[in-house]
Amino acid sequence: MKKSSILLFAFILFISCKSTDLRTQQKINSARVIAEKFLELEKIPGMSISVSQNNKLIWSEGFGYSNIETKEKVSPKTTQFRIASISKSLTAVALAKLMDDGKLDFNKSIYTYVPDFPKKAYDFTVRQVGGHIAGIRHYDYSNNEKELFNVKKMSIVEGLDIFKNDSLLFKPGSKYSYSTYGWNLLSVVVQNASGVEFNKYMKETIFNPLKMNSTTIGLVDKEMPNRTQFYIKDNDKVIVGPKVSNEYKAAGGGFIATSEDLIKFGNEIIKPTIISKVSLKELITPQYTQDGKSTEYGIGFGVVNTKNGTPRYSHSGGGIGSTTFLMIFPEENVVISIVTNLSQVPIRQLTAKLEDVFID
């Protein structure tokens, strides 16, 4: 190739890269305006948003405060939020790892792994529990003091006592009914199948290999210096939420993490390194009820299509002092994580706008 041709190619490449950088910066600027308006409108004390493309962090920013009283600002690198039900996605990867290791079969009865769980009118599988079609109930909102505002420290096995004697809501496979308690049961499956205490298994097998160094169980009785304060709304006033213990339901909603740690996790789903593509497919394949209707949910992941017809794997989270969302776009190689420290935020309004910005 002649020197002039090489110079021309280098110039075109330089202009192309500059154009790409400019488009990315324009997207970030638009997203920042959207986020700031949303924060103000919803009176969110603190929020963190991180976005990666091609496994590279392109935008990561904290908004507002992790603690209103001390005016401590949110850091996407260090501020730990309750991720609530995104915990189910993390636990799903643990189940996939056990499948890879030959220690778990998604199609086997739950009683294979938890033989002392009370027998029900019907048998049901690990897959059905993971896809919310087993018939296990969710929270009893008429008994919030016992179920949502619980402060009693319990192990994951002790946590089964809350629901284990209740009947199934329906014949497994016949309907979809979201259940965090089902994932409580799955944490015992992980523990029994692996022979390792659940939280230790998650740390050693999932968090450490992915360098998710700020992801851990949220402890009710221990000061965690990087953990945000948790807020709720009382009418239109933002106040500190009640203390709650989520340790017994770690798998379904008990982990805390930074928005940047969730990006690391999301990129594992795009290009798996600790689990196989075979086991990953089990998690991201939508399940169907017996009438042939898609649940748009695999095992620990919601599965829908973008406006372009490409897949989006995601999970929302909501708890006392937290509203969160994780979106993974494998074909676009984009991951978006959003974590807040306020309950009952209409987060899907924000996720829809950010998806429009970053997914062309």
Image (cartoon, rainbow, N blue to C red):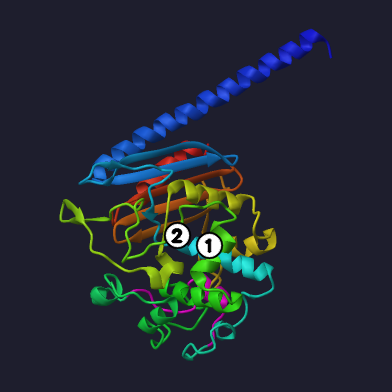
Asked if residue 228 lies left or right of residue 257, the reply is left
Is 129 displayed left or right of 217 in the figure?
right
Which badge, 1 or 2, is on the more N-terminal residue? 1
Residue 216, numbered label = 2
Please tell me whether residue 165 is drawn above or below residue 26 in the rendered image.
below
Mark 1 element type? helix
Residue at the image point whose x is 61% and y is 50% from the top: 270
Within the image, what quadrant is residue 61 found in?
top left
Task: Give 267 or 33, whichever is nearer the viewer.
Answer: 267
Rendered image quadrant of residue 255: bottom left
Q: Position of residue 308 (x, y in %)?
A: 55, 43
Q: Secondary structure at mark 2?
A: strand
Residue 145 visible, this angle: yes
Q: Amino acid at mark 1?
A: Lys
Which residue is pictured at 34% across the width and 52% down the height? 225
For the residues labelled 1 and 2, the Cα–Cα distance comes to 8 Å
Counting from the top left corner in percent of width and height, residue 9 is at: 72, 16
User: In the rendered structure, are the residues bearing label 1 and label 2 in contact, judged by CB atoms less than 8 Å apart?
Assistant: yes
Q: Is 80 covered by the magenta stretch?
A: no
Q: Residue at x 44, y 47 (%)?
A: 259
Magenta segment range? Answer: 123-139
Side of 343 relative to 181 (left or right): left
Number of residues whose C-alpha sits closer than 10 Å to that of mark 2, classed few (under 14), some (14–19) or many (20 or more): some
Residue 299 visible in image = no
Circle 1 packing at 10 Å, graded few (<14), some (14-19), many (20+), is some
Q: Which numbered marker is on residue 244? A: none
Q: Which residue is mark 1?
A: 203
Question: Residue 161's x, y, as percent?
Answer: 38, 84
Who is closer to the viewer here, 146 or 73? 73
Give, as a three-letter code, the residue at label 2. Answer: Thr
187 vs 42: above or below: below
* Relative depth, front residue between 232 and 134: 232
